Amino acid sequence: MHVLLSEDDDLIASGIVAGLNAQGLTVDRVATAAATRAMLHAAQFDVLILDLGLPDEDGLSLLQHLRQQGLELPVLILTARDAVTDRVAGLQAGADDYLLKPFDLRELSARLHSLIRRVAGRCVNTIEHGGLSYDPSSRQTRLDGQPVQLARREQALLHTLLHNRGRILSSEQLKDSMYGFSDEVESNVLNVHIHHLRRKLGSGIVETVRGLGYRLGPADAGSGQSPA
Ligand code: CA
């Protein structure tokens, strides 16, 4: 899951980034409304965490503009404004959820997962795919009931594939889901992670769509171990 964090307070931002990284989420942080717009154009995200008090533009008006321009990303507002009218204004401007400062990181993470889940139209936590099950909040992966250890980037890759079932994803989209904007990424890194996923979850887990990208393989192709 790739999170864009728009927050100008360095201390709050670094706490959120560290906390969400520890939960296996990829986070890019920006500190202004202008940088938020630029990032949303530059990369693919699954959710936006938006501070309302940004230095160059009010978060509410930024959100309104983004929604008018067709932004469909789920948005969680962070705010120190706790008046009911402010919260209502936030939801009317197009936020999907909000959290009052100060907040507990565990609550933020739980709300992010619930937002993503709601957008994907699921009400249960675990994503099932043939013999595979993946729980995004505990990051537990099981194949035919047996736990499988996945590295952080492999989890991110698997989550993105499961989340976009039936869709073809380009290499860029998959890399965006695993790496932050400022991470140094080697050109063959996606192939390496796909190789590991196929080795651990069966060769059918990722389908190569020649010339276009990749997609989640059919559910019944999952469990057979591929030849090493
Ligand atoms: Ca602020």
Image: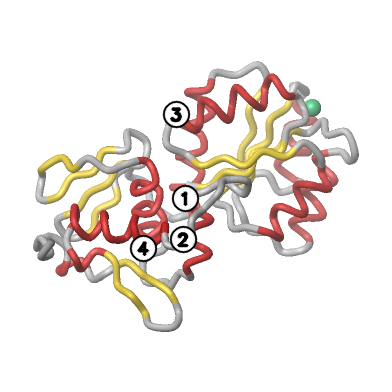
* Structural crowding at the residue carrying mark 4, measured as other residues with C-alpha within 10 Å and reported as few (<14), some (14–19) or many (≥20): few
* Structural crowding at the residue carrying mark 2, measured as other residues with C-alpha within 10 Å and reported as few (<14), some (14–19) or many (≥20): many
**Mark with earlier residue (2, 4):** 2
Horizontal arrangement in the rendering, residue 12 relative to residue 85 (left or right): left
Picture quarter with ligand 1: top right
Which residue was labeled with disc 4? 191
**Mark with earlier residue (3, 1):** 3
Identify the residue shown where x is 22% and y is 40%: 149
Total count of labels: 4
The Cα–Cα distance between marks 3 and 4, rounded to whole angstroms, is: 24 Å
Which residue was labeled with disc 1? 178
Front residue of 80/211: it is: 211
Which residue was labeled with disc 3? 22
Horizontal arrangement in the rendering, residue 192 relative to residue 170 (left or right): left
Q: State yes or no: Cβ of the residue under disc 3 lies below 8 Å from any atom of ligand 1.
A: no
Local SS, label 3 = helix
The Cα–Cα distance between marks 3 and 1, rounded to whole angstroms, is: 14 Å
**Mark with earlier residue (3, 4):** 3
The Cα–Cα distance between marks 2 and 1, rounded to whole angstroms, is: 7 Å
Which residue was labeled with disc 2? 174
